[in-house]
Amino acid sequence: MSSENSPKWATDLDNSEWEKRFLSLKKASAIHGLDDWKTLDGEEKSAVSRKIVALLDDENSRVRSQAAAAIANLHISEAREALVTALADPNEWVRVQVADALATVGNPALAQVIADHLQDEQETHVRATLVKTLGCIGNEKMFPVLALYLEDPDGRVRANCVEALAKLKLEKSELKKSLVKMLNDPSNRVRANIALALVSIGDKKGREIICDMLNSDEEYMRASALYALGELNASEDRERIVKFFADPSWLVRKNAVRSISKHGKKAVPFLLESIKSACIQTRLGILDALRMIKDVSSRKVVIELLEDESGEVRSKAEETLDILDAL
C-alpha cells in the first residue's frame, strides 16, 4: 500500500508510543475516519485493516478498546474471529467495546459463541452489552438464551434484554407473553423498553405504560417515558413532551429536549408556536431543542428572543443564534 494514499491517521497505527496509536484509532473511529476509509481501494483497505485488527492484541488496554471501536466504525468484517477471541480480554472495558463491535460486524453464525461468553461473564455492563449484541445479530433461536436474562439482577441487563427480544422478530404472542410478566419491574429503563416493544407489535398496553410513567412521582420514570416518546417519534406526542420542559427535575427537562429533538425539523413549526409560552423554562427548553435540530428557518424567532424579558432566555437565544448562523 502506498503511504501516499493512506489516511493521515493510519501512519501512527504502528507507532511505538501507545498514545499515538490510540489517537490514530480514535480518528479512525470518527466520521472523518470513515470518509477516508471509503476513498481507499481494496488493497489499501486490507493493509490498514490488518494493522487495526492486530491492535486488538496491543499491550495497552485503551488501544485495544479503541481498535474495537475503529473496527465497528469502518465495518471491518474480517475482524470477526479476532473480536470473538478478544471477548476473553482481561479488561472489562475492552470486552464492552468488543461486544459492541460484534453487534455491528457480527452475524448469526457467531450468536452461540457470544451466548457462551455471556454465560460466563461476571461484569454487569459487559453482560448488558453482550445481551444487546445477541439482539442485533441473533434470530429466534436465541430466545431461550435471552429469556434467562429477563431475570438478571441488574436493571441494565434486563432493559437490554427486552430490547434484544424485540429485535428477534418473534411471534407477537410469544414476545408479549414474556414482557407481560415484567410489567411491575422496578427499573425505569426496563419499563420504557417494554412499552416500546409492546407499541412495536401494536399492543395498546405500551402507550398505557408510558402514560403511567409520565405521571410518576419518580423523576427517572418520567425521564425514561420521555425517552420512549422520542423513539416513537409521533407528532401527536409533541405537545405532551413540551409540557415537561418546565418539569422541576433537570434530568426530565433534559430528556424532554432530547425527545422532541428526535422529531427533527418536522417539530420546528410546533416549537416556534409553543415558544410564546409565558414559562421561562419552556422557552429555554425550546431554544435548546432548536439548537439541537439546527433548522435555519427558526432563526427569525430566535432573534426576537434576544429582547426577551428574561436574561437567561436572552443568553440562550444568543447561543442558539450562533449555532444557526454557523450552518
Image (cartoon, helix red, strand yellow):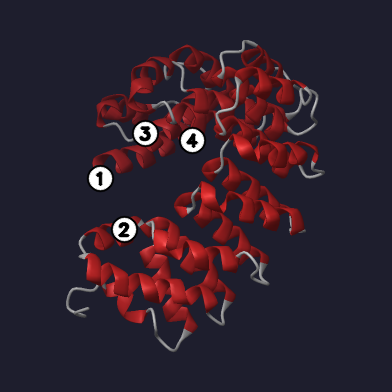
Q: Give the side of residue 242 with respect to residue 188, left or right.
A: left
Query: Which mark lies nearer to you, 3 or 2?
Result: 2
The kind of residue tagged 3 is Ile
In this rendered view, identify the residue nearer to me: 301 or 238.
Answer: 238
Q: Position of residue 42 (x, y in %)?
A: 23, 65
Asked which secondary structure carries label 1, the reply is: loop
Please report whichever mark, 4 or 2, sits nearer to the chain's N-terminal start: 2
Asked which secondary structure carries label 3, the reply is: helix
Q: Are marks 3 and 1 in contact (CB under 8 Å)?
A: no
Please report whichever mark, 3 or 1, sits nearer to the chain's N-terminal start: 3
Tag 1: Cα neighbours inside 10 Å, few (<14), some, or many (≥20)? few
Q: Quadrant of the C terminus?
A: top left
Q: Are marks 3 and 2 in contact (CB under 8 Å)?
A: no
**Residue for badge 1:** 326
**Residue for badge 4:** 312
**Residue for badge 3:** 293
Tag 4: Cα neighbours inside 10 Å, few (<14), some, or many (≥20)? some
Q: Position of residue 203 (x, y in %)?
A: 61, 13
Q: Are marks 4 and 1 in contact (CB under 8 Å)?
A: no
Tag 2: Cα neighbours inside 10 Å, few (<14), some, or many (≥20)? some
Q: Are marks 4 and 3 in contact (CB under 8 Å)?
A: no
Asked which secondary structure carries label 4, the reply is: helix
